[in-house]
Image (cartoon, grey):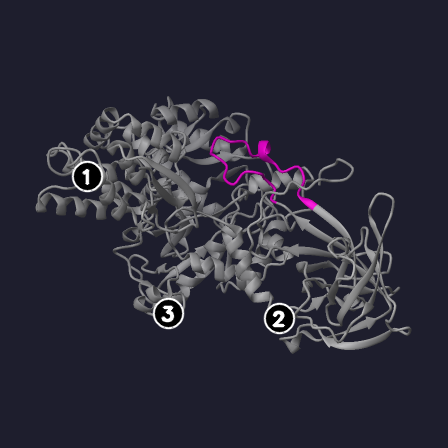
Amino acid sequence: MELKLSFPADAPPLAVIAAAKIAGVPISTDPTLTSGSPPIIHLHNGLKLQGTCVLLRYISRVADIHDLYQRDPIESSQIDEWLDYAPIFASGSQFEEACGYVDGYLLQHTFIVGHSLSIADIAVWSGLAGTGKRWESLRSSKKYQTLARWFNSILAEYGVLNEVTTTYVGKKGSGKPTVAKVKEQQGSNANVSKVTGDGPDKEKAAGRPTFEVDLPEAEVGKVKLRFAPEPSGYLHIGHSKAALLNQYFAERYKGEVIIRFDDTNPDKESNEFVENLLKDIETLGIKYRTVTYTSDYFPQLMEMAEQLIVKGKAYVDDTPREQMQKERMDGIESRCRNNSVEENLKLWKEMIAGSERGTMCCVRGKLDMQDPNKSVRDPVYYRCNQTPHHRIGAKYKVYPTYDFACPFVDAHEGITHALRSSEYHDRNDQYHWIQTDMGFRKVHLYEFSRLNLVYTLLSKRKLLWFVQNGLVEGWDDPRFPTVQGIVRRGLKIEALIQFILEQGASKNLNLMEWDKLWATNKKIIDPVCPRHTTVIGERRVLLTLSNGPDDPFVRIIPKHKKYAGAGEKATTYTKRIWLDYDDAVSISVNEEVTLMDWGNAIVKEIQKDQEGNITHLSGILHLEGSVKTTKLKLTWLPESDELVKLSLVDFDYLITKKKLEEDENFVDVVNPCTRKETPALGDSNMRNLKRGDVLQLERKGYFRCDVPFLRPTKPIVLFAIPDGKQQPVLRFAVPDGKTK
């Protein structure tokens, strides 16, 4: 009978699926578990098994192939050892070390254990395949020939594995690890503790994420870190993770953080971005010692480039850019690589002068054009650029690349540990090689996973496209993942910090849902934010209460029944009150309903127009009635000139696809309608709202005031705050057919 396999969509258990395919065990897949959950097999008797290793052993026991696991005690135990080892391939920092170890081991073995295929082979094979582009580049090189030969032989023998990798790893070269994340993967050689400082036993009991806090060779009191954004956009949620991790480690080791603006590309950078990045850093509460700029070191960087040219460790190349890129991909040395020092210095001076000849050239490091890691194939160190720099004007015609400037400035400023997201992993060898050529000590690199969110673009280039094309108001647009954007949407910084710190410094790649962040935010705002009342403007319906007060009267009631600090509000009680149309259509004749903050009423008559639309309700107050017995609890507003106009604004995701593939054009999945405005009326107390105030509209959700009351004819603008309940991509319809 077919087994049901459940797992998170962002972490399919590749080894389990591969084992089932090879073993002939029929399974159906259900990728709906929440991120971070272990894979589960649902048995026919209602029981469940969970965990990658457990599922592999179970499949091997019910398989048509009888010796996948069930062998003599020694070989079965050896298989267990390898199952524990296999998750190491998903650890970025240990991947190549593991490849080298298994490559050497296979020199003496045809299979991982014994003389036939076992689930140990499947686990290791899937661990490699799950890293996508990373393994594919090594597999096609000559670096780990024995390992590649073993990998290819299994693929040739079991053709079903092609189907598995195509479905669950994606296109060749996608480069995104998708192997299951198991407990053993999370830093078996790392000390862990809670953000709060409690011990590991207590942490496990709490079931919360942990930090891998062991910076290599870190000494308490001597750790120096840097947060180095490029001033080419505003700070976004991904940068926030880097900034907060730097602060966490600085506090953990009683060290310090500096802010450094990596301003080496004048085409993209501006003082506006510098000012707003500093504003965002302050918003996050980052404590730093000083602010520096890479441009502060331009003279020293130019001097270093010239020294490397003189030492034969760099050269000037005038190869056209497209040809240079192709040669780097193919491992072909440039014809300029062996130019004399004199020729290189001559061309270097042309570059500095910005002459016509100089602008055709760049400076490249002389590293290794045959290395399987393409980042060390003679990277570019300097390029010409005639654009004036936002800080120093047109003084320079040449600018260093990030790859050249970063290792220099890190070493020069005494940085002990440079935190970088794992997307830079392939550049680590390049970083240390360049530092060695420069004669500097080694700066330790520490990797953490980039924070990726569904339906979200974090590339500043792509975000800039939305700004330039007028699809958003600016970098602080509430649809943007920038700090200013999500704060304007109604997110509290405390929620953002809590959300990021709960992710820890893990190196596991995750595609996160926004729901968890907004649910955390709701827990912060709900206990304290004031409550107000609103009625949707379109087709609202009057309810006339025949025994209601002839003379309106006012009561002062709390804005939040459980939190006095929210203040009080004045509520007017009248004979004629407004109801939402959607509430009116749900009422039956002679039904008793509850009017919130007043009492019960009985609706006696419902009037409709020729199209069947409700136009008016009539009823009587029945204040002695029990609010516990009524089905409908209705919000209402008095018919009064004191009501204020509102514009309730809801937002949708900017793109319609959860996750873009590397070769996919984001423009093709831009959501055409991402903003919806709903006219409404609000209680008179809302005149006192200030920009940035967070409130709850009874039965309608949470909102942030973006434009406060200015005059009666201009509506107060309230932005809807998500509450953590999962929402689909809505693609709002706009009445005039236009998109917003």
Does residue 320 appear in this view?
no
Q: How far across and down, in percent of the image, does residue 419 sit? A: 40, 53
662 magenta-colored: yes
Tag 1 residue:
102
Graded by Cα atoms within 10 Å as few (under 14), some (14 to 19) or many (20 or more), the crowding at tag 1 reads some
Tag 2 residue:
528
Left or right, 56 with respect to 576, comes to left
Count of numbered marks? 3
In the figure, 253 relative to 648: above or below?
below
Quick check: marks 2 and 3 in contact, CB under 8 Å? no
Q: How far across and down, in percent of the image, does residue 220 sit? A: 33, 67
Secondary structure mainly formed by the magenta segment: loop
Q: How far across and down, in percent of the image, does residue 12 sit? A: 37, 41
Element at label 2: loop
Q: Distance of mark 2 from mark 1, alpha carbons? A: 57 Å
Q: Nearer the viewer, mark 2 or mark 1?
A: 2
* Sequence-wise first label, 3 or 1: 1
Q: Distance of mark 2 from mark 3, alpha carbons? A: 28 Å
Give the quadrant of the N terminus: top left
Q: Which residues are magenta?
A: 653-675
723 magenta-colored: no
Amino acid type of the residue that numbered disc 1 sits on in the rendered structure: Val
Labelled disc at residue 197: 3
Element at label 3: loop
Where is residue 82, by image quadrant?
A: top left
